[in-house]
Image: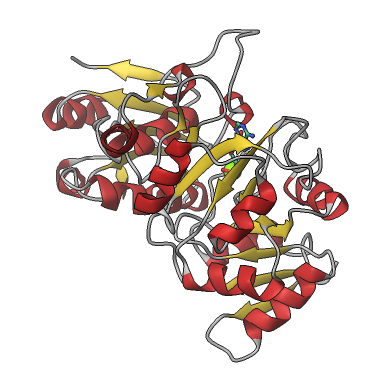
């Protein structure tokens, strides 16, 4: 398949992408979280092609992106009170809300679930494209299934060239990790995936929110999962990755003792100068937002540098750090080394 490449800065680019989507095609588009691989959410065949292009398991549902509240009433059967409060505070923005779906959402889009995940993105290019198509767009991350999510145009090109109809450049993503996902479809609100909108902020807005066990821990064989995406190995570079917990001092000493060929430290900016191994940094120890912005780029960089063994320093698990930890512990296949 020929993949057309666009730059959102050029006149006519978003119109051309909207036309491709209206015709049932696939296009990778920028959002503030990560790039998404978009298709018409109402078109089952187009959505089935998203799964094919990404190599995504068919039981992992897609997030549907809207550009106004009118579209919301088209994709869900009811809007719970909590969703109204959250939408008022965090939309447009990096928050996905799971609600009961409307009859217009095909089974492939929601992977046979009676619910649908909905987000109203803030990125101007994403919003423009949704508006121009006049359709809600199903869009999971625009990477090959299993590899780190794409936060730049080049990441999408690397993964999807020849597999999709179009890729449009809207610059690097500012948030860097996928949206926070909260389910309001059950009896109690549950945080299924942490992101830039934090658990603390959600609780301030709607009261008690449960933290799904799958956020921090590996699920046991046969355990019920609320968010199918959480059960797959994810975000992993080719190297064997361990997530190391402990103070900077202990981390640096530990890694220096394990220096060797192909060994890399995935560390905070402040630690790089005192490490004896090669390093890839993912932001300051003191900025969880910076860590989120850089984590996927850093994981991809380890691959391009040929790392074979990686010791990643664990972030704190409060605020946005919970999202960074959630991605890293999956990249490490839950291999955690405790130094304390
Ligand atoms: P991605 O866009 O690649 O980050 O994947 C979307 C994420 O949303 C996956 O982890 C899915 O499991 C989750 N998701 C989408 N729809 C639903 C739903 N109806 N119920 C629970 N999780 C969902
Ligand atoms: Mg994904």
| Furthest residue in direction left, as rendered | 249
Q: Is residue 289 left or right of residue 34?
A: left
- Residue at 68 percent of width and 53 percent of height: 74
Q: Is residue 170 visible?
A: no
Residue 310 horizontal/vertical position (percent): 40, 34
Give the quadrant of the N terminus: bottom right
Give the quadrant of the C terminus: top left
Residue 35 falls in image quadrant: bottom right
Q: Is residue 286 left or right of residue 305?
A: left
- Residue at 60 percent of width and 65 percent of height: 29
Q: Is residue 336 visible?
A: yes
Examine the rendered structure and indicate whether residue 21 appears above or below residue 265: below
Examine the rendered structure and indicate whether residue 220 appears above or below residue 82: above
- Residue at 84 percent of width and 70 percent of height: 23
Quadrant assignment for ligand 1: top right
Nearest the eye: 143 or 213: 213
Specify how the rendered protein is coloured: secondary structure
Image mark count:
0
Nearest the eye: 32 or 269: 32
Residue 277 horizontal/vertical position (percent): 28, 40
Examine the rendered structure and indicate whether residue 23 appears above or below residue 63: below
Residue 207 horizontal/vertical position (percent): 31, 28
- Residue at 71 percent of width and 71 percent of height: 133
Q: Is residue 170 left or right of residue 156?
A: left
């Amino acid at each position: 398949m020929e993949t057309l490449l666009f730059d959102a800065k050029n006149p006519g680019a978003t119109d051309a992408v909207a036309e491709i989507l209206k015709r049932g095609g696939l296009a990778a588009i920028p959002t503030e979280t990560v790039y998404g691989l978009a298709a018409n959410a109402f078109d089952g065949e187009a959505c089935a092609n998203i799964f094919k292009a990404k190599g995504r398991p068919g039981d992992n549902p897609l997030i549907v992106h809207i550009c106004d509240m009118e579209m919301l009433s088209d994709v869900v059967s009811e809007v719970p009170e909590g969703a109204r409060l959250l939408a008022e505070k965090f939309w447009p923005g990096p928050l996905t809300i799971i609600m009961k779906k409307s009859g217009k959402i095909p089974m492939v889009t929601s992977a046979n679930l009676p619910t649908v995940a909905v987000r109203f993105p803030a990125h101007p290019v994403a919003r423009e494209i949704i508006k121009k198509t006049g359709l809600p767009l199903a869009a999971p991350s625009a990477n090959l299934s299993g590899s780190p999510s794409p936060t730049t145009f080049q990441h999408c090109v690397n993964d999807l060239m020849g597999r999709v109809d179009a890729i449009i450049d809207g610059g690097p993503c500012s948030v860097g990790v996928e949206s926070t996902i909260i389910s309001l479809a059950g009896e109690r609100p549950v945080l299924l995936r942490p992101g830039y909108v934090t658990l603390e902020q959600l609780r301030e807005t709607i009261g008690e929110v449960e933290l799904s066990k799958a956020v921090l821990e590996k699920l046991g064989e046969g355990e019920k999962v609320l968010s199918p995406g959480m059960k797959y190995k994810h975000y992993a570079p080719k190297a064997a990755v361990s997530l190391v917990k402990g103070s900077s001092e202990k981390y640096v000493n530990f890694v220096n003792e394990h220096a060797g060929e192909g060994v890399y430290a995935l560390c905070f900016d402040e630690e790089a100068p005192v490490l004896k191994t090669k390093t890839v940094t993912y932001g300051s120890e003191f900025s969880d937002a910076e860590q989120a912005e850089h984590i996927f780029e850093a994981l991809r960089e380890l691959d391009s540098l040929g790392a074979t063994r990686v010791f990643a320093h664990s972030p704190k698990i409060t605020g946005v750090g919970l999202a960074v930890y959630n991605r890293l512990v999956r990249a490490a296949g839950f291999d955690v080394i405790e130094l304390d």
